[in-house]
Image (spheres, rainbow, N blue to C red):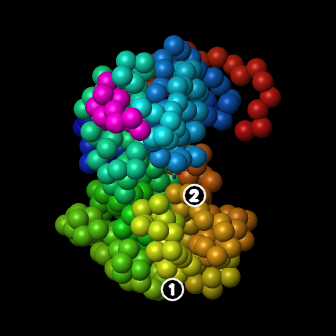
Amino acid sequence: MIDFTGSHILSVNQLDRDAIATIFSTANTMLPYAQRRKRTKVLDGAILGNMFFEASTRTRVSFGSAFNLLGGFVRETTGISSSALSKGESLFDTARVLSSYADVIAMRHPDSGSVAEFAQGSLVPVINGGDGSNEHPTQALLDLYTIEKELAANVQSIDNMHIAMVGDLKFGRTVHSLSKLLAQYKNITFSLISPKELAMPDGIISIIENAGHRVIITDVLEGSLNADILYLTRIQEERFPSPEEANKYRGQFRLNQQIYTQHCKSNTVIMHPLPRDSREEANELDVDMNLNPNLAIFRQVENGVLIRMALFALTLGVADQVQQHESEVNWFSHK
Ligand code: CP
């Protein structure tokens, strides 16, 4: 198992079942702090460099919130144009500089492999917040954590489940990382539903098949709607040469309440890494699903804070000290 203290978290390839279990059990201990029932100052004085060179809402803000919830401070930069990368500075030099200002760095960048390259120059642990269409390890961990909890509520387990992954499986980095994590479990049926041009990369399919799982590849949604987990994804417009190219694939795999009632099991769990494309023409995951109790998308968001808190506590070596630095919350909390 990975020795978390001081380690970069760049790929799910670093995480075996023991490491996943350690992250999840640490995440469970973070609940009172994430829910503002208690506060902790275990990272008092520590600084997170939150370096997002590509658009983000949840990953960037939840990394920052997770660090604040552990008592640490956050310094941010957003966008390549507002950093010296736009003046030709290398990722190595950027990392060497930024890591002298911080104790840990969370980083997102539009190019595959960029976060690993950045980490080579960093003096402190780097956590991958998404590198191009390659990987999104913290999203995959929060997805897996959510799947485990949602299935447990239905008295099911990850072993033997049926997951349908739907949409842009070529560019969707969340499904790449999640598939690799799931491959470590047993006897899963993967329905991979996408336009042929946006199919799951062969390398990921090989990992799943070589681990003994069943893979169904199709461009038809209807036959797989009765899966235990239906994991929808957005067409990753930013990876296409033009919006018009991406438009060709919009609306092919729509889910709304009527389709859910007609085709899904009564307890099929609906997941999406978000953002969902809520423009009318997107026809992706309709807002009429918001009242469906099996829609787990906002529970995924909440679980993301727990997972990111756990990764900070583990990489900075304080996971066993969080409670020691605990105090009461003295403000009104709605949580
Ligand atoms: N799921 C996810 O990565 O969302 P953001 O792009 O908003 O960070």
Q: Residue at x 66, y 68 (%)?
A: 279
For badge 2, the amino acid type reads: Pro
Q: Residue at x 46, y 33 (%)?
A: 83
Q: Assign the C terminus to one quadrant of the image.
A: top right
**Which residue is more in the foreground, 109 or 302?**
109
Dominant SS in magenta = helix
Mark 2 lies within 8 Å of ligand 1 (Cβ measured): yes
Q: Residue at x 45, y 50 (%)?
A: 139
Q: Nearer the viewer, residue 218 or 317?
A: 218
Report which residue position mark 1 lands on: 222
Residue 290 horizontal side relative to residue 305, left or right: right
Tell me which label, 2 or 1, sits earlier in the chain: 1
Residue position marked by numbered label 2 in the rendering = 275
Quadrant of the rendered structure where residue 71 is?
top right
| Rendered position, 192 above or below 122 | below
**Viewer-nearest of labels 2 and 1?**
2
**Residue 50 picture location, percent across and down:** 48, 32
Circles 2 and 1, Cβ within 8 Å, touching? The answer is: no
Q: Amino acid at mark 1?
A: Glu
Q: Secondary structure at mark 1?
A: helix
Q: CA distance from mark 2 to mark 1?
A: 23 Å
**Element assignment for label 2:** loop
At x 42% / y 57%, what residue is drawn? 174
Q: Is residue 93 magenta?
A: yes
Q: Which residues are magenta?
A: 85-96
**Residue 326 in the image, given as x and y percentages of width and height:** 59, 18
